[in-house]
C-alpha cells in the first residue's frame, strides 16, 4: 500500500503532477504520466483532497502499446475511510424510504389483523392463558422449521446468551399474558388506549429505579399521556377493573423488558428476527406450566367444545390466524429496529396504536362517547410529544 502525504512545505499536488515509474526498463524517450486533470474554477477547492493520506489499492499493469483505455487505473481512498470511494455503493435515499414504508405498512397491517382475530377468539373462548401460549408456540414452531430447512440461518447462541435473555423473556411473558387478559375483559380500543401510557411507566421506572434524569420536556409530555388515559378510563362504557389492570401490568412489564434487553443484550450477535424467535421459545417454556396451573386442560377442553358448537370450524381458523399473525407482526417490528432509529420506531408504534383503535372500533362496532374519544386522542398526542422530547 502506498501512502501519499501532502507536505506543508511543498506546493499543492494534482494528479497530473504525479509520475508513476516502472522498475523495469521502458523504451527510451517515453515517459508515462497520469492524464492531466482540469484545473478547478477559481474559488472552488479541488475535488481530490490531499490533506489526508491517500492509499492506492490497485494499479493495473500498463504497457507502451497505445490503447484507447486509460493506461493506469487507480483506486484511492482517504485514510480514515474503510473502503474506496464509490458513489454507486450508497443506497439511494428514495429506496431506503420505500423499504421503511413497507416495514411500517406491514407492521401495522399484521398488528390490526392479529388484534381482530385475537378478540374474536377471546369472545368465543375466554381463556387468555391458553391463547397466549398458542401464540408463542406457533411462532416458535415456525422459526424452528425455518432453521431446520435453512430458510433462515440459525443463530449461534451459548449458555451465556440464554442466561442473559431469561429476564427479558420473563418480562415479555408477563406483558403478553397481561395484555391478552385485558383484551378478554374489555374492548380492544380501550386496551390500546391504556397501553399508550407505556412511556409514563418508562420514565418513572428509569427515574426512580435506575436513577436516570430527563429533560423537562419529557416530564411535561407525560401530563397529556396520563390525563388522556385517565379521561378515557373514567368515560369507558364497558369499564372492567381486570381489563384495566391487565393493560397497566402489561405496560410495566414491557418497560422492564426493554430495560433488560438494552442492558443485557449489548454486544450480542443475535438480533432482529432470530432474537425475537429465541425470545418466543424461552417465553413459551416459562409460560406453559403457569397456563396449565391457572386454567388447565379440563377447562380448555370444555371451552373448546363450546366454541366449536357456537362458531363452527371457523373457530379453528381464528385460533390459527391470531397465533400466526401475532408472531409475524412482532417479527417485523424487531426486524424494523435494525433499519430505523428508535425515534422513528417510537413514532411508528404510536401510529400503529391509532390504526388498531380505529379499525377495532369500526369492525366490532364499539360504542364510543365523544369525551372518551377525546381522552384517547390526548393520550396518543402525548405519546407522540414524548417521543419527540425524549429524542
Image: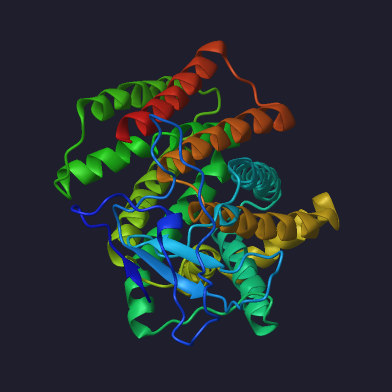
Q: Position of residue 342 (x, y in %)?
A: 41, 45
Q: Position of residue 368 (x, y in %)?
A: 60, 19
Compare residues 318 and 243 and report the one nearer the observer.
318
Q: Position of residue 221 (x, y in %)?
A: 32, 25
Q: Tell which residue pokes out farthest to the top in this image.
A: 370
Quadrant of the frame with the C terminus: top left
For residue 257, which quarter of the picture? bottom left
Quadrant of the frame with the N terminus: bottom left
From the viewer's perspective, is residue 164 above or below residue 199?
below
From the viewer's perspective, is residue 391 above or below residue 170?
above
Compare residues 365 and 111 and report the one nearer the observer.
111
Compare residues 49 and 294 and report the one nearer the observer.
49
Left or right of residue 213: residue 350: right
Residue at x-position 50% and y-position 70%? 31
Whether residue 106 is visible to the viewer of this picture, yes or no, is yes
Q: How many marks?
A: 0
Q: Tell which residue pokes out farthest to the bottom in this image.
A: 24
Amino acid at each position: 500500500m502506498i501512502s501519499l502525504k501532502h507536505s506543508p512545505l511543498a506546493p499543492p499536488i494534482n494528479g497530473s503532477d504525479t509520475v508513476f515509474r516502472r522498475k523495469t526498463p521502458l523504451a527510451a524517450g517515453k515517459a508515462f504520466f497520469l492524464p492531466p486533470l482540469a484545473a478547478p474554477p477559481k474559488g472552488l477547492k479541488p475535488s481530490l483532497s490531499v490533506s489526508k493520506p491517500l492509499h492506492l489499492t490497485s494499479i493495473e499493469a500498463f504497457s507502451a502499446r497505445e490503447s484507447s483505455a486509460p493506461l493506469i487505473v487507480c483506486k484511492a481512498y482517504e485514510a480514515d475511510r474503510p473502503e474506496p470511494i464509490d458513489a454507486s455503493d450508497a443506497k439511494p435515499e428514495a429506496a431506503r424510504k420505500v423499504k421503511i414504508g413497507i416495514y411500517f405498512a406491514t407492521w401495522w397491517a399484521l398488528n390490526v389483523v392479529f388484534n381482530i382475530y385475537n378478540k374474536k377468539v377471546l369472545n368465543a373462548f375466554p381463556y387468555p392463558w391458553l391463547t397466549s401460549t398458542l401464540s408463542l408456540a406457533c411462532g416458535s414452531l415456525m422459526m424452528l422449521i425455518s432453521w431446520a430447512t435453512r430458510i433462515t440461518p440459525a443463530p449461534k447462541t451459548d449458555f451465556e446468551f440464554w442466561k442473559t435473555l431469561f429476564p427479558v423473556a420473563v418480562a415479555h411473558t408477563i406483558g403478553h399474558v397481561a395484555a391478552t387478559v385485558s383484551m378478554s375483559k374489555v374492548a380492544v380500543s380501550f386496551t390500546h388506549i391504556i397501553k399508550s401510557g407505556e412511556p409514563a411507566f418508562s420514565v418513572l421506572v428509569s427515574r426512580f429505579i435506575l436513577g436516570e434524569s430527563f429533560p423537562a420536556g419529557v416530564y411535561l409530555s407525560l401530563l397529556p399521556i396520563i390525563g388522556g388515559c385517565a379521561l378515557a378510563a373514567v368515560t369507558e362504557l364497558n369499564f372492567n377493573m381486570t381489563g384495566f389492570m391487565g393493560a397497566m401490568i402489561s405496560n410495566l412489564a414491557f418497560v422492564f423488558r426493554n430495560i433488560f434487553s438494552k442492558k443485557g443484550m449489548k454486544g450480542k450477535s443475535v438480533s432482529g428476527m432470530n432474537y425475537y424467535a429465541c425470545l418466543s421459545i424461552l417465553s413459551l417454556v416459562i409460560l406453559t406450566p403457569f397456563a396449565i396451573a391457572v386454567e388447565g386442560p379440563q377447562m380448555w377442553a370444555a371451552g373448546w367444545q363450546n366454541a366449536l358448537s357456537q362458531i363452527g370450524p371457523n373457530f379453528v381458523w381464528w385460533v390459527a390466524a391470531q397465533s400466526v399473525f401475532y408472531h409475524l407482526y412482532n417479527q417485523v417490528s424487531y426486524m424494523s429496529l435494525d433499519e430505523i432509529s428508535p425515534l422513528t420506531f417510537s413514532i411508528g408504534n404510536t401510529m400503529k396504536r391509532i390504526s388498531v383503535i380505529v379499525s377495532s372500533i369500526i369492525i366490532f362496532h364499539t360504542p364510543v362517547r365523544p369525551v372518551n374519544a377525546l381522552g384517547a386522542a390526548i393520550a396518543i398526542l402525548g405519546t407522540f410529544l414524548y417521543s419527540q422530547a425524549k429524542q
